[in-house]
Amino acid sequence: MPKTIYSITIAVEDLEEAVKNYESFLGVKPTYSPGYEVLFTECGLKEIGVDYKDQIAVFHLPGIRFILLTGFDKETPIGRFIRWKGEGVFMISMEVNSLKAEEKSLQAKGKRFVFTDNLETHLGTVNMIHPKDMNGVLFELIQTPKNMMKSNKKQWRGEGKNGE
């Protein structure tokens, strides 16, 4: 069972314009995370067209993050999403205690996962429930490591060097 909503990712066509809009609405400045290119390359996602270099802005609010994401081109997953559905909620990320237990439980209920093997990221271990099994919404499940360095977790939460 998910512990909490970790983040909501919103697909946008124009990141600069979207940042202005959300900055005005939320009243906070975003943290840009160009390191996603390195992260996803390490996970092997770049090979399937996921490339988030300089195309992400993260707004940190108490207990949740709003992530704005734009596609590198029209053939990346984000680019295709925007082309087919327009701008909007792309993914909801949920933190879980045990990803393996969640996968087993959800697979028993007929849910399919996007990746056969879980991905190891700077956030922890992740996998995604196929959007066709969740009424068109992509859900990411994240199991954060128990021994995650506090500085890394603080930086992602916006409490570290990039998100003062």
Image (cartoon, grey):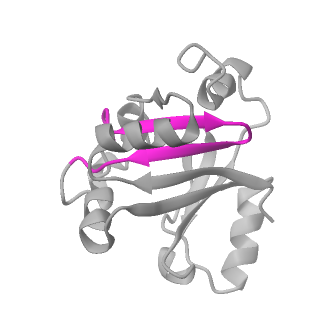
| Residue 161 on image: x %, y % | 57, 13
Q: Can residue 96 be seen in this view?
A: no
Q: Is 60 included in the stretch rendered in magenta?
A: yes
Instruction: Report which quarter residue 112 is drawn in.
Output: bottom right
Name the foreground residue: 27 vs 56: 27
Q: Which residue is drawn at 32% across and 60% down?
A: 77
Q: Left or right of 97: which side holds 32? A: left
Residue bounds of the magenta highlight? 52-72
Instruction: Give the quarter of the image for residue 104.
Output: bottom right
Q: Where is residue 144 in the image (x, y as percent from the top left)?
A: 71, 42
Q: In which quarter of the image is the N terminus?
A: bottom right
Residue at image position (43%, 45%) is 68
Q: Is residue 58 visible?
A: yes
- Is residue 143 toward the left or the right of residue 33 in the image? right
Q: Residue at x 51, y 60 (%)?
A: 91
Which quadrant does the C terminus fall into? top right
Outermost residue on the bottom side: it is: 110
Depth check, front residue: 31 or 43: 31
Q: Residue 128 magenta-drawn?
A: no
- Residue 142, how many percent across, how many down? 65, 51
Farthest residue, direction top: 161
Residue occupying image coordinates x 48% and y 68%? 114
Q: How many labels does the image show?
A: 0
Q: Where is residue 115 in the image (x, y as percent from the top left)?
A: 49, 64
Q: Nearer the viewer, residue 93 or 85?
A: 85
